[in-house]
Image: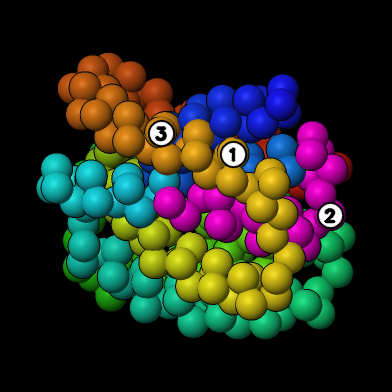
Amino acid sequence: MSTIIFLVAFGIVVGMLTILLGGGGGAIYLGILTGVIGLNAANAASTSLVTSLPPVIIGAISYYRQGKIDVKIGNQMLIAALPSVVVGSILSHFIPDSFYKWIIGLIMIILGVNMLRKTKSVSESTIDNSGNDRLKASLYGCLAGLMVGIAGMSGGAVITAGLFILGLETFNATATSTYVLAFMSTVGMLFHLAGGSIDWHAGLPLTLGAIVGAIVAPMLASGLAKSSISKYLKPFIGTMLVLLGIKSLL
């Protein structure tokens, strides 16, 4: 019983963070499912996707109603991300855990450092429609899709980092990231469901808590967007990426 209460409470916190930070909760869920619950990597990856999907969908709907989502750039990312999710899901059966953990860890560290550098050197601006930006959006989408398909991570950290680097304002970036993740996670979940490796005993309490957190988070975001806290969000996410990347390498 105490484990269920812990999972529900933890789900609420992670659900809120997932929506406020534009995703990235998959990495946190993986850490809990493997480190605390004791699931193996394959089961944890599948359970993580199922757990993170409902709050992401709720968050995307709420942000869309608030007009915070840049649908155009989000769709550009999805064009590359969705095929990558499919490819990653197929490859996940053949790639050793240790190998893709190293790859993902290094990628997260590089993106985190890049975000911290951008925070110091570039002021926020709106994204333009240049071919270079479209290419970057596709690359970030492709990378995030592989993370979803292969490792069961949400890919939100990569999407959000990419949107920040491309120049979207803080909560427009997190809202757009949530929009992209809703579609990516749905495709990834379907592939992992087919494998039948989901631990529902751990997944259901986490999902219940995450849904509650996701309902509350967009309301908090509206208030936070008007405060000075938004300027600290980029360095926080950048630091989180670096720490999660280091943890993946250990």
- Where residue 21 appears, as percent x and y from the top left, is 42, 38
Residue type (three-letter) at the residue carrying disc 1? Pro
Query: Residue under circle 1?
Result: 205
- Where residue 183 appears, as percent x and y from the top left, is 39, 67
- Which of marks 1 and 2 precedes in the sequence? 2
Marks 2/1: CA distance?
18 Å
Q: Residues within 10 Å of mark 2 (few under 14, many from 20)?
A: few
Q: Is residue 118 left or right of residue 166?
A: right
Magenta-span inclusion, residue 246: no
> Does residue 6 lie above or below 142 as drawn?
above
Q: State if disc 1 and disc 2 touch (CB < 8 Å).
A: no
Residue visible at 57% across and 57% down?
49
Q: Which residues are magenta?
A: 34-54
Query: Residue under circle 2?
Result: 40
Residue type (three-letter) at the residue carrying disc 3? Val
Marks 3/1: CA distance?
11 Å
The main secondary structure of the magenta stretch is: helix
